Amino acid sequence: MATLSGVDGKGIIVTGGGGGLGSAMAAELCRLGARVVVCGRTEETLGQVAEAIGAELGDGRAFAVTVDVRDPASVAAMADRATELLGAVDGLVNNASGLFPVKAEELTPNGFDSVIKIVLNGTWHCTAEVAGRWLRAGRGGAVVNVLTPYAWMGAPGIVHNASAKGGVLAMTRTLGAEWAGRGVRVNAVAPGWMPVGGTDFLAGDPRVRRRLIEAIPAGRLLRAEETARATAYLLSDDASYVVGEVLTIDGGHHLSKGLYEFLDELPGRVS
Ligand SMILES: CCC/C=C/C(=O)SCCNC(=O)CCNC(=O)[C@H](O)C(C)(C)COP(=O)([O-])OP(=O)([O-])OC[C@H]1O[C@@H](n2cnc3c(N)ncnc32)[C@H](O)[C@@H]1OP(=O)([O-])[O-]
Ligand SMILES: NC(=O)C1=CN([C@@H]2O[C@H](COP(=O)(O)OP(=O)(O)OC[C@H]3O[C@@H](n4cnc5c(N)ncnc54)[C@H](OP(=O)(O)O)[C@@H]3O)[C@@H](O)[C@H]2O)C=CC1
């Protein structure tokens, strides 16, 4: 019987691997057979993630490496260490991010820069470093950028992050096309709301949670593991002809429910 090739045996770097989605994604990728390096700025949280994965799946599956994605030298050092630990790096998940809700007219130049540097510049630094190594070695690899549907829909209240994610969307398509002929694939996932990390505080409040869910056609929040599995597909050889694509996983949220909710109330409707 034919089976999907998946990420079994692959070595994968997950940036922001100590965070809500990053840690869940690292664990699920390991359950699917990968070995991961989780990286970010905080040694303690990264260590806890690697330890939890080790406790569940055994030693040698997850490793913690510190990095500041805003700094190309730090990213190069992280890539060196990841190569030592994993043997070979086959995939990169650009998941690190930062934001704070703010009215656009109140956002300072430095506030805008602080988010752009993490999300847009950081994604570029990691991609340029890791994919540059693959290209120089004449081997392939897969990059998956973590977007959100607001990369193309816009996101009032977080103009800095939406602008950065929009830039990463353009980067995904550009590099996807530029490097496809050399075996380096660049794609993205665009998850909807998950009750983890940056949105935990929203989804933890029952009233806010209900309002969020009411707007989602699928009628529930997304599970982090579902994002991990979509990411695993894009990292796998099963997606070898998928290039510059964005896999949206939001239960139809960005499409909205349209008129459907009001269908029974519409004048002239015959039931
Ligand atoms: C939503 C659905 C999707 C979810 C996505 C996520 O969850 S993503 C993950 C979510 N998780 C995270 O984001 C966690 C990680 N987040 C962080 O590390 C920080 O929030 C960071 C992104 C600002 C980066 O920090 P940093 O050390 O680089 O920055 P800094 O402290 O040096 O400040 C730089 C400038 O920003 C200004 N400023 C800062 N806060 C506010 C505010 N609330 N209000 C107004 N302004 C604010 C600050 O005043 C300063 O400007 P100034 O005064 O010089 O003109
Ligand atoms: N939660 C959700 O519902 C959704 C999340 N997303 C996306 O998922 C991704 C993860 O978000 P989430 O888990 O919620 O957020 P978290 O805040 O939990 O994770 C963000 C991670 O990024 C790391 N990070 C921040 N700055 C840097 C830096 N300069 N260098 C290295 N690492 C850094 C943080 O670690 P440290 O501070 O230790 O460096 C942290 O681990 C983001 O890209 C986000 O946009 C998309 C849609 C919905």
Image: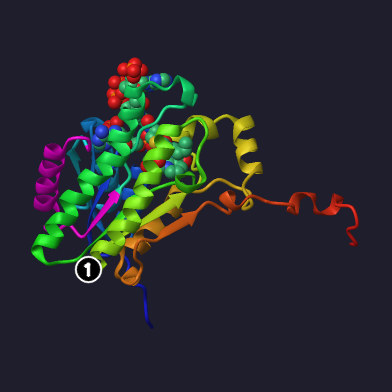
55 horizontally vs 133: left or right: right
Name the chief secondary structure element in magenta.
helix
Residue 59 in sight in this render:
no
Position of residue 232 measured from the top left corner of the image (x, y, whole percent): 35, 60
Position of residue 211 measured from the top left corner of the image (x, y, whole percent): 64, 36
Position of residue 144 measured from the top left corner of the image (x, y, whole percent): 32, 55
Q: Which residue is painted at 27% across and 47% down in the image?
A: 14
Q: Which residue is painted at 14% across and 66% down in the image?
A: 139
Quarter of the rendering containing residue 125: top left
Q: Quadrant of the N terminus?
A: bottom left
- Residue ID for mark 1: 183
Decide whether residue 67 is among the magenta residues: no
Name which residue type carries label 1: Gly
Quarter of the rendering containing residue 73: top left
Residue range of the region highlighted in magenta in the rendering? 69-93
Q: Which residue is painted at 44% across and 51% down in the image?
A: 190
Residue 183 in sight in this render:
yes
| Quadrant location, ligand no. 1 | top left
Position of residue 159 measured from the top left corner of the image (x, y, whole percent): 45, 33
